Image (cartoon, grey):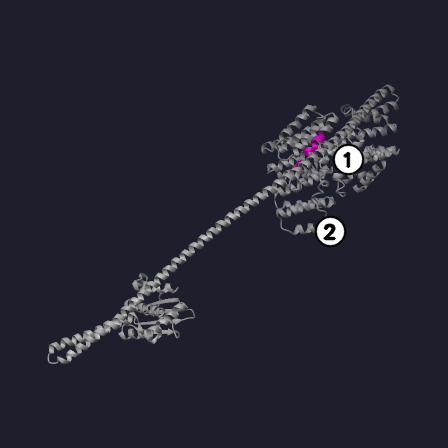
Amino acid sequence: MKSWLLSGVFWLICLNVWAHTYSDAEARSTWARLQRQPLSEKIFRETCDLIQDVGQTNLPLAYEWLAQYVAKIKKTGNRRWIHILLINWGKAKESLNHYDEAEPIFTQARQNAQPVPLLYCQALTYTAQLYFDWDKPDSLARYLALGEQVARKANDRETLALLRVFRGASRSRTDPIETVCADFNDAIRLARHLPNKNALFMALHNRASYCLMDLQQQVVAFDSLLMLANDSTLARNPRFYERTTVYFRSPRPTVLFKLAQLNMMLTDYENAGKFADMVYDELVRPNPKAPMVPYFDAEMAIVRFYQGQMKQARAFTDSSRRLFGVPENKIPYSGYFLAAGLLAEHDGQLVKSADYYKQSLTKGATAASFSQIPPELFYVRVLIRLRQYEKAQAILKTLVTAATTNRYSAVGLYYYQSLADLNKARGNYDAYGNALDTYYAIRDSLTSLNQYRAVQQILAGVRIRDKEQQILRLRSEKEAREQQLQRERLFYGVIIALALLMIGLLILYLRNRQLRARQQEALHLSKLEQLEQQQQIELMQHVMEAEEKERQSIADQLHNEVNPLLAIATLNVSSALEKLNDSATNSQKLQKAQHTLKSVSHSVRGISHRLTPQVIEQQGFRAAIDDLADGITMSGKVRLQAIVVGFDQPFPIPFLSDLYRIVQELVHNVIRHARATEATVEVIEHDKHVTILVDDNGIGVSDQIQGDGQGLRTIRAKVALRNGQMDVHRKPEGGTLVVIDNLEFPAEGASLASRLGKADRSIS
């Protein structure tokens, strides 16, 4: 009852694309390595792949490992893993017609899967398939009912569709055709929108097989199934762990197989041979060591016999017997005995042929064969030639229904041929004539049909050639249009590229212009800032020069005018004192006046000295600083230590005066604000600049310095004028450190002018 599909005929043979070919030693080494690994999903899948790949060439070893691995996995309690192994083990046995070995395996699968509805549905589906292929209708009916009940509760549409297919196929021999087709249509409805197309393909396949009585209509239906066979869910064969419910192994070869069967039934052996060759090329030649090869070799022997190619038929039969590797009477496939019987009958070995035909009747169904002609017809033909008429007539009576149902096919043709031969042998010439007329009518019908099909094939070939020419013409026109479009695209592409290039260059030009404008603007602003700074510096220089000149003028007036007048007044008072010795009162007043004049004269000299410390011009900068330090130390307020490094070469007097006034102002700040007892002044000459450090041990003057009084502002201005920096730090141990650094030397011209000025004053 395997006519609904090839069952598991392609269980291992069709996996040649995925399979890894192992040598025996390599396979055993890999198996040992995997068994040492701790169980995980990755290791489980690798082991399944190994078993499946080894089954391509060494099926007994694959069975041995399956048995060992099932026992190992059962100890883990992982129901999914156990389910995968049992289902694939069972369907492997079932596909090779070892039904009695598959039955207990599927029993274990059902027991393991029962707590999980989805897995249980899959196990029940495979059980139904087993009893369908095994031709056990009672067991099939029981598991169909149980499977539908479980699938409805689980809302498993795929399982329901598959079970409908099994039920429809099982009813095909007993129920009306309408009932059978209703089951298949229901299966198609359930499977129509499922993402996986296996159930839909099975339903359409079986509806074409069982519901279409006209063989030509079946050919059209199966031809249309080739389109569905290209669906991604059908085109690739899954691994063990990817799908554990019923599915088609290689649906395209299955359809080709069916087309070969139909052409055999139509006695169109030439086309049947072509389709059989296509099946063989897709399934057997890529994997010549697969376990199903002897089965296919037997089928190819039958096809070659019908084609009249006896030499090839014998070669395929011998190959099948050799590959089965068992005694001939132990070969488990009816197709082999049918092929052997046909060849023996052709050789005139009628007794041997009859024995082969008899064995073909006991080796299982032949629906999975290329030839769907019942083997009984060949057995009857030999029995008639052996004059066993009663036995032949009894067998023919069992074939009346099949011959009536399939009258205009090879079944009807050979049935009425055998019936005519039997009636002729028994002398029943009326029945012989009727049977012979029917035989010729069927033969003529099939011949006409095949001739019509041949003509149609010729016309189809002509149409195909016309279409090919039209396609070539359209293709050339398309290529010409594409070339024209390509040229136009290239032309417009070049134009667009040039336009884009011009736009890009314009953008770059504008950006460059804008950048240059910004740079020029920035340069202009920088020049303006420099000019402003230069103007400020020049203004400050002029102010300071004017201030210095004013100081010099005041100092000169004090020194040249006030001091002489005070000296004269002092002399006059001294002279008056000498003349007024007798008047005590007047004498005291004059003495007091003399003392006051001396004090004023001393103050005027001090002011004059501070305004323009002439000691710088007279004795040098170092002496001026030392004189300042000595004067402050002698005052008793602060003990000031002065350190001057360098200044051996002459510098412009204004520059030295600025340095002196900076030091003077800083020291006065220490005296006024720091409350210090000791202070140090360091003035250091470097190669291109001067550094001034003032250090004291007082309370610190940072707060007051940050306030920037008039004196400090003047200092900062002078420091800035010389491009120097001024920093004030409060020391951690107390006191303040003032650092003035990077005071630049004056320009050479200024230095020379200053020297010239100094020389002029010295001469005067």
Residue 564 location, x and y as percent? Answer: 23, 74
The residue pinned by badge 2 equals: 25
Task: Name the element at disc 2.
Answer: helix
Which one is nearer the viewer's eye here, 633 or 750? 750
* Distance from the alpha carbon under mark 2 to that under mark 1: 36 Å
Q: Is residue 484 visible?
A: yes
Which residue is located at x 75 percent, y 31 percent?
464
Return the x and y of residue 107 as percentages of the image width and height: 66, 38
Residue type at tag 1: Ala
Query: Is residue 76 or residue 231 the one in the foreground?
Result: 231
Decide: is 383 above or below 555: above
Instruction: Name the quarter where the C terminus is drawn.
Output: bottom left
* Position of the N terminus by quadrant: top right
Query: Going by the picture, which residue comes out furthest to the top?
Result: 430
User: Circle 1 sits in a helix, a strand or a loop, which is it?
Assistant: helix
Q: Which residue is mark 1?
A: 276
Q: Position of residue 326 (x, y in %)?
A: 80, 42
Camera-nearest label, 2 or 1? 1
In magenta segment, residue 274: no
Residue at 46 percent of width and 53 percent of height = 520
The answer to whether residue 423 is left or right of residue 620 is: right
What are the residue bounds of the magenta stretch? 221-231
Residue 347 figure quarter:
top right
- Horizontal side of 623 relative to 458 (left or right) equals left
Neighbour class for label 1 at 10 Å: few (<14), some, many (≥20)?
many
Magenta stretch: dominant secondary structure: helix
Figure disc tally = 2
Q: Say above or below: 653 vs 310.
A: below
49 left or right of 321 in image: left
Q: Residue at x 86, y 22 (%)?
A: 423
